[in-house]
Image (cartoon, rainbow, N blue to C red):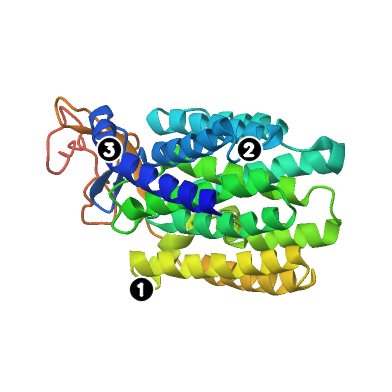
């Protein structure tokens, strides 16, 4: 108990300090996002990864809280996912690289012996989808961190109930690190996680959920997994319904309904808490698998209702800033429509053509 309190406090303070210290290097390197007219550094995710890895690694190295071989591999695979996200934060990468890299990392984590090959392949796909869903949540201030804290605490309870002390310790350290990150990411954010922190958080949580429920009865396990990740699933479903870019995300649509940035983060956090609580109670046997149907119904209703709300670009626009000149080069420059003229069309100016009506040729 004493180590748990010490480790959580250390992870929180270390991540909070690193989030503040890494703002200046991010600005100097031009690793920033533009959010609602503000330029925000991207290295908050690096702080989350470093805070979680350092505290968990020290506990394992000193022998105070052994992670175990499997949990150590999970943490290293999560760091690999974070590196993949960091590369994407700094430069454009092909779309197929990220899911392929996440699938390779998940392949080292999934317990094939307890799941069997078909279920293991499904688990790899599920881990990749959840990691992408958390990356989508990371584009709104305070949302990814809030959902990550709630999910990590619930999964930590599931792991503790299964006497997986190393995994429970890692999840508690991750929850504390995300809390320290939220001290700088709460709206209006002074730093953001980028794909680095979001992919790390989503990957570790999804992989931990698979490890906890491997070898158990399929129906309660699937019900608990869905309830624990209901909010990221809802965000992913909104994107699959045809909405592209920021318009397909949860927070922009809630903002369109009149909520503030803080209000949207609170609403999404409360929804994540409700789903995570149901998942934890199913895992502990206090509720039957049928309780997940209530979560599924609420998720479906929310997705259908929000899909009718036109989203707008309140998320982040990734761009690089040249430190020397101070000029901003946006990857996708806006297209300016040509001026419209009377008659409903748009006339393009052609060099060498005289203005005014075309002279008529006399008819012989």
Q: Residues within 10 Å of mark 1 (few under 14, many from 20)?
A: few
Q: Which x, y percent locates residue 288?
A: 80, 72
N-terminal of the pair, mark 3 or mark 1, is 3
Q: Which residue does the image show at 40% across and 27% down from the upper left?
A: 91
Q: Can residue 353 be seen in this view?
A: yes
Q: Mark 1 points at which residue?
A: 258
Quadrant housing the C terminus: top left
Q: Residues within 10 Å of mark 3 (few under 14, many from 20)?
A: some
Q: Mark 2 points at which residue?
A: 66
- Point out the frontmost of discs 2 and 1: 2
- Point out the frontmost of discs 3 and 1: 3
N-terminal of the pair, mark 3 or mark 2, is 3
The front one of 14 and 347 is: 14
Q: Which x, y percent locates residue 28?
A: 23, 29
Q: What whole-number distance in Å separates the C-alpha atoms at marks 3 and 2?
A: 29 Å
Which quadrant of the view contains residue 300?
bottom right
SS at badge 1:
loop
Q: Which x, y percent locates residue 259?
A: 37, 72
Using the image, determine if residue 130 lies above or below residue 289.
above
Q: Which mark is residue 21?
A: 3
Total marks drawn?
3
């Amino acid at each position: 108990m004493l180590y748990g309190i010490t480790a959580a406090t250390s992870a929180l303070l270390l991540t909070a300090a690193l989030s503040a210290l890494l703002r200046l290097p991010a600005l100097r390197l031009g690793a920033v996002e533009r959010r609602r007219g503000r330029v925000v550094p991207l290295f908050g995710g690096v702080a989350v990864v470093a805070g979680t890895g350092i505290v968990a690694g020290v506990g394992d190295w000193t022998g105070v809280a052994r992670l175990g071989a499997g949990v150590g591999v999970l943490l290293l695979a999560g760091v690999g996912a974070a590196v993949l996200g960091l590369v994407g934060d700094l430069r454009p990468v092909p779309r197929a690289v990220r899911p392929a890299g996440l699938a390779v990392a998940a392949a080292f984590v999934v317990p094939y012996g307890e799941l069997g090959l078909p279920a293991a392949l499904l688990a790899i796909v599920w881990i990749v989808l959840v990691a992408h869903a958390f990356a989508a949540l990371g584009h709104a201030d305070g949302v990814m961190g809030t959902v990550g804290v709630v999910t990590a605490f619930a999964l930590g309870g599931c792991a503790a109930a299964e006497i997986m002390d190393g995994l429970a310790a890692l999840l508690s350290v991750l929850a504390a690190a995300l809390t320290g990150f939220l001290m700088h990411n709460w709206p209006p954010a002074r730093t953001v996680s980028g794909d680095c922190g979001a992919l790390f958080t989503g990957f570790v949580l999804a992989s931990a959920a698979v490890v906890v429920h491997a070898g158990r009865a399929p129906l309660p396990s699937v019900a608990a997994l869905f309830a624990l990740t209901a909010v990221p699933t809802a965000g992913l479903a909104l994107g699959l319904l045809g909405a592209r870019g920021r318009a397909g995300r949860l927070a922009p649509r809630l903002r369109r309904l009149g909520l503030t940035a803080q209000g949207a983060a609170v609403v999404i956090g409360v929804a994540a808490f409700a789903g995570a609580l149901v998942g934890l109670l199913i895992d502990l046997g206090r509720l039957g698998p049928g309780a997940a149907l209530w979560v599924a119904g609420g998720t479906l209703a929310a997705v259908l209702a929000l899909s009718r709300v036109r989203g707008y670009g309140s998320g982040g626009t990734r761009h690089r800033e040249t430190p020397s000149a101070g000029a901003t080069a946006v990857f996708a420059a806006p297209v300016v429509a040509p001026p419209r003229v009377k008659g409903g069309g748009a006339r393009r100016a052609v060099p060498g053509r005289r203005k005014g009506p075309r002279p008529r040729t006399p008819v012989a």
